[in-house]
Image (cartoon, rainbow, N blue to C red):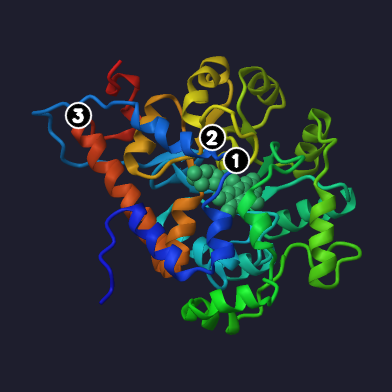
Amino acid sequence: MAPVITCIEDLRQLAQRRVPRMFYDYADSGSWTETTYRANEADFQNIKLRQRVAVNMEHRSTAVEMVGQRVAMPVALAPTGLTGMQHADGEILAARAAEAFGVPFTLSTMSICSIEDVAAHTTQPFWFQLYVMRDREFIERLIDRAKLAGCSALMLTLDLQIVGQRHKDLKNGLSAPPRLTLANLVNMMTKPRWCLGMLGTTRRGFGNVVGHAKGVSDPASLMRWTGEQFDPRLSWADVEWVKRRWGGKLILKGIMDAEDARLAAQTGADALIVSNHGGRQLDGAPSSIEALPAIVDAVGSHIEVWMDGGVRSGQDVLKAWALGARGTLIGRPFLYGLGALGQAGVTKALEIIHKELDLSMAFCGHTQLSHVGADILVR
Ligand SMILES: Cc1cc2nc3c(=O)[nH]c(=O)nc-3n(C[C@H](O)[C@H](O)[C@H](O)COP(=O)(O)O)c2cc1C
């Protein structure tokens, strides 16, 4: 019998059963001790909502705008690498679910399905996330490809010049496609749906890189290339350069400090995302929701401030909104949905979060999310 799914945790448990360990662990992990990863979720629980009663709660709407784009709720799908390894053709399925729901989808530089492939299988523009690599010609072409594919915003990630260590990825020997070691084969044999899906698709490598980057021909050279390419020299001058080359809506991702937020706002970017990369980079950094208020205070009137990290429910979205985030992104919640049930699982994750947001907003005495302010929080 199909399990009854009522919350994101249900999707996580199902994904854990259905996705090979290497890729499930890749999603459900943070760097080193995972303290920041855990705090991202836990710190939401310390924020309390003010319940109101006897207020007309009919005719509600959670619709708002993110960088001028109408969205069904202030939630976008975060860029996540290797999404096509959680489920065959994962990026295409997630993009389609987002499109049907009316929220933005962000394609990672490190996706399995390429920009062109996702564009060919969707009807609405999506966003593209850029990592700056040492090979600047490759980056120029990547920006141009995103433009050509009609992407409506570029999300430049600033917090991954160097890579935090995740113990599980090292122990599992993470790679895409997975190496066919005995341990991997034994584990994959317990995931028949995943295997069938993967046998039915040709999308198993880094679609944006293979055939586009110099010297990348086979899985071994690809893994080497990705390991060496993240550019540790990334600077604010590079941000200016990317902004000029792109010429469209620009979102800066990975800001955790008010001083950096001021510098980000000075670039003239359209939005910034308070993010610690889902607890995958600096272990020991505060949770994103803890870092949010100071950044809203510093730059909230100059640039749209969004946040991601630890959002697992509509209540979390509501709390972030009340603290001044004009948008949120979800990573693991949609990955769990995808791993559990494919496109239907991503839709399910969005439905769950939307319903929780809609009802919780009403319990706080509001019918329009756009009118909700900090006064819904217990201080
Ligand atoms: C499996 C996984 C892969 C990720 N890959 C990328 C990526 O390629 N680019 C990027 O900017 N952020 C990446 N992130 C970070 C997410 O965009 C986002 O900041 C984070 O997942 C938010 O936290 P949450 O998962 O608790 O919602 C990744 C996160 C996860 C979990």
Label 3: which residue? 365
Q: Nearer the viewer, residue 101 or 337?
A: 337
Question: Given the image, on which type of amino acid does mark 1 rest?
Answer: His
Circle 1 crowding by C-alpha within 10 Å: few under 14, some 14–19, many from 20: many
Q: Earlier in the sequence, mark 1 or mark 2?
A: 2
Whole-Å distance between the Cαs marked 2 and 3? 33 Å
Q: Nearer the viewer, residue 109 or 248?
A: 109
Label 2: which residue? 36
Whole-Å distance between the Cαs marked 1 and 2? 10 Å
- Helix, strand or loop at label 2? It is helix
Q: Nearer the viewer, residue 303 or 351?
A: 351
Indicate if the residue with disc 1 has its beta carbon within 8 Å of ligand 1.
yes
Q: Position of residue 52 (x, y in %)?
A: 16, 26
- Helix, strand or loop at label 1? It is helix
Which marked residue is nearer to the observer: mark 3 or mark 1? 1
Whole-Å distance between the Cαs marked 3 and 1? 33 Å
Circle 3 crowding by C-alpha within 10 Å: few under 14, some 14–19, many from 20: some
* Among the 4 quarters of the image, the one containing residue 188: bottom right
Question: Given the image, on which type of amino acid does mark 2 rest?
Answer: Thr
Q: Residue 277 bears which disc, if any?
A: 1
Q: Residue 362 bears which disc, if any?
A: none
Question: Given the image, on which type of amino acid does mark 3 rest?
Answer: Gly
* Among the 4 quarters of the image, the one containing residue 159: top right
* Among the 4 quarters of the image, the one containing residue 61: top left
Which marked residue is nearer to the observer: mark 2 or mark 3? 2
